[in-house]
Image (tube, helix red, strand yellow):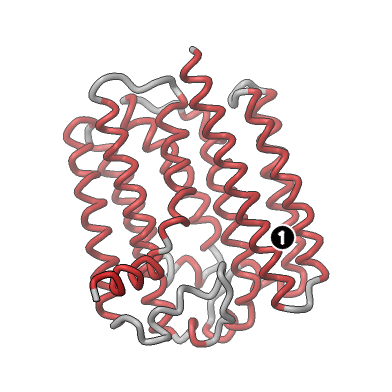
Amino acid sequence: MVSAKISIYWKLLRPKTALSTVLAALGGAFYLGLPTGFNYIILLLVVIGVALAHLSINALNDYLDYRSGLDTLTPRTPFSGGSKVLVDKLLDPREALLLSLTLLAIASITGLIITLFRGLLILILAFIGAFIILTYNNLWVKIALGEFMVLVKGILVFLGSMYAVHGLIRYDVVLVGVVYGLVSVVVLYANFIPDIEADRAIGRRTIPSILGEYAWVGYTLIISTLIALIVLLVAMNMLPYTSLLAVVPGMLLFKVASTLKRAKRLEDLVESLRVNTIACRGIDTLITLAIIARALII
């Protein structure tokens, strides 16, 4: 019984999706160099906090999408349409909501602990993050700003982790945070595409639902911006030159764009979403490893 419940929670929370947020936190934590002494404890709290906040988002989105009827309309894929845990009656919706709020509360507590050592800026950043989480589904995604808020989340996690671990923020490197945010946007944007008709039916205004059959154009613009930004930041010495390795999986995204343009079957979309997810994880993993490697050298 316990193992079955854990399995259901795992499916609802989708822990592997939190990797993008954890990588952004690690990138920020090591960008200015290696943490020292007690700062490793702060880093651990940061990673725990951002991971739990991400899992809270997953559970809350499933709850709200179930309540709105969206998840009964979206096609089932491994990458979009929610976990279907609530649609399949595997879990009481109130339990999913309680789990989400509990995780968010614990994440907030880690933020409060870090605030004791780093000051009110951490509390402000945590409040902004919690506000985005709680209002994403009922506000931002309805006014076509859902993707933008995911971009903001990446920047906040990167800069917030930098400040928490080192006690300072270099605002001149905000574009590095934009890279992490854009990677998350690319994943989210592509995953919205199979749900275009369902999103339209309940009044959600994702960028793909607005562009319709031209959603691939928006996707191409985003990935082009991402790749160009990585190259630019390396040229400006704001990312280590080894970050250029991230361009290799980045090239796969253009293949995804081509598939999205001509895909007529759900099966074709699912395969492109799989490649998209793998490529994006490759990008932010390689950039984070490059940042950590530089920190070990300097």
Q: Is residue 225 above or below residue 43?
A: below
Which amino acid type corresponds to the residue marked 1 in the rendered image?
Gly
Q: Give the image quarter of residue 46.
A: top left
x%, y% of residue 57?
38, 62
Quarter of the rendering occupied by the N terminus: bottom left
| Residue 193: percent from left, percent from top | 65, 71
Give the number of callouts: 1
* Residue for point 24% across, 51% down: 108
Q: In the picture shown, does residue 231 fall above or below 102?
A: above
Q: Residue 145: horizontal and vertical position, in percent?
A: 53, 62
Tell me the residue at 41%/82% (across/down): 66
- Considering depth in this image, is 133 or 39 the residue closer to the camera? 39
Determine the residue positioned at 76% across, 59% down.
Answer: 257
Circle 1 residue = 218
Residue found at the far top of this picture: 298
Q: Nearer the viewer, residue 243 or 197?
A: 243
Viewer-closest of 261 and 168:
261
Above or below 206: residue 249: above
Residue 282, picture quadrant: top right
The answer to whether residue 159 is left or right of residue 246 is left
Q: Quadrant of residue 100?
A: bottom left
> In the displayed structure, does residue 176 sit left or right of residue 85?
right
Which of these two is toward me, 79 or 179? 79
Q: Residues within 10 Å of mark 1 (few under 14, many from 20)?
A: some
Q: Residue at x 78, y 78 (%)?
A: 264
Q: Does residue 277 appear left or right of residue 42 in this picture?
A: right
Q: Position of residue 167 (x, y in %)?
A: 31, 25
Q: Secondary structure at mark 1?
A: helix
